[in-house]
Image: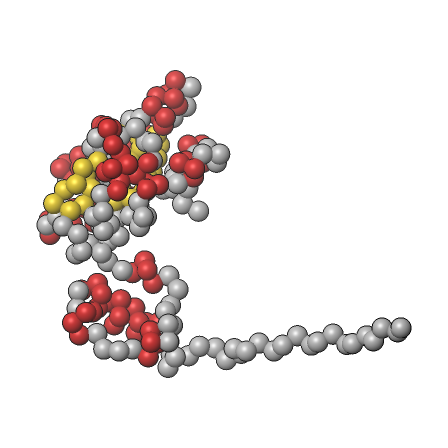
């Protein structure tokens, strides 16, 4: 019995060959009008129905624009003297609102020296501590040690306190009541964190999940 051979079916044309235009999804408008309404707390009161979101068209990466600082009444407060750099708080945070960083001794001291206000300079200094893992071990090897710090992004923290629970008996984190002054200080501290260089690779063991949480790329 002979077998009938059929020609292969041609690959289908792309369904969407027309680029998405502003009348379908205006990214700038979405960011300012919709994300902006959620950030200022007016979304539930006055945000009208929207054609784009009705069709589930949402620009990628817009989550980074959301500001949750007005949601929770409390925010984590770090006591760097008790921190052991276990990174449990960073791993447990469901919103990636708390991050760690290691800064070489000479680099941090140089950056702090550039801050003219003594109180501000001391505040940033207290965000870093000397831990066994990143300070003592390297100092014993004759290598430059690093200061370790934990930082909270006030726009992403929802005050769930999971980081405090993860810290446990170390007692390096506690919840602090928010006010306008507190939020401004946290934002300045977060800005200082983002200005610091990435954690040097020598402090990151790629075989450890906790260390990989220090890598920014």
**Residue 14 is drawn in which quadrant?**
bottom right
**Residue ID at (88%, 74%):** 2
- Assign the N terminus to one quadrant of the image: bottom right
In the displayed structure, 177 sits above or below 16; it is above
Whole-percent x and y of residue 63?
32, 60
Say whether residue 215 is visible: yes
**Residue 91 is drawn in which quadrant?**
top left
**Residue ID at (24%, 50%):** 157
**Residue ID at (30%, 74%):** 29
Residue that lies at the very extreme toward the top in this rendered image: 140
**Residue ID at (38%, 72%):** 57
* Image side of residue 130 versus residue 186, left or right: right
Return the residue nearer the eye: 41 or 29: 41
Whole-percent x and y of residue 183?
16, 50
In the displayed structure, 211 sits above or below 95; it is above
Return the residue nearer the eye: 149 or 90: 90
In the displayed structure, 4 sits above or below 176; it is below
């Amino acid at each position: 019995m002979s077998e009938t051979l059929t020609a292969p079916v041609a690959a289908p044309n792309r369904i969407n060959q027309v680029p998405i235009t502003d009348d379908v999804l205006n990214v700038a408008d979405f960011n300012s009008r919709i994300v902006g309404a959620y950030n200022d707390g007016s979304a539930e009161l006055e945000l009208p129905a929207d054609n784009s979101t009705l069709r589930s068209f949402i620009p990628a990466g817009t989550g980074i624009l959301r500001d949750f600082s007005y949601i929770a009444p409390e925010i984590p407060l770090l006591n760097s003297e008790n921190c052991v750099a276990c990174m449990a708080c960073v791993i447990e945070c469901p919103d990636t609102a708390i991050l760690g960083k290691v800064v070489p001794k000479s680099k941090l001291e140089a950056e702090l020296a550039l801050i003219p206000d003594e109180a501000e300079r001391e505040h940033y200094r207290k965000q870093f501590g000397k831990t066994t893992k990143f300070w003592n071990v390297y100092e014993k090897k004759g290598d430059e040690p690093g200061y370790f710090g934990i930082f909270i992004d006030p726009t992403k923290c929802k005050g769930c306190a999971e980081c405090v629970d993860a810290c446990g008996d170390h007692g390096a984190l506690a919840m602090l009541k928010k006010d306008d002054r507190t939020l401004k200080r946290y934002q300045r501290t977060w800005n200082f964190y983002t200005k610091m260089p990435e954690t040097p690779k020598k402090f990151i063991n790629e075989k450890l999940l906790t260390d990989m949480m220090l890598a920014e790329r």
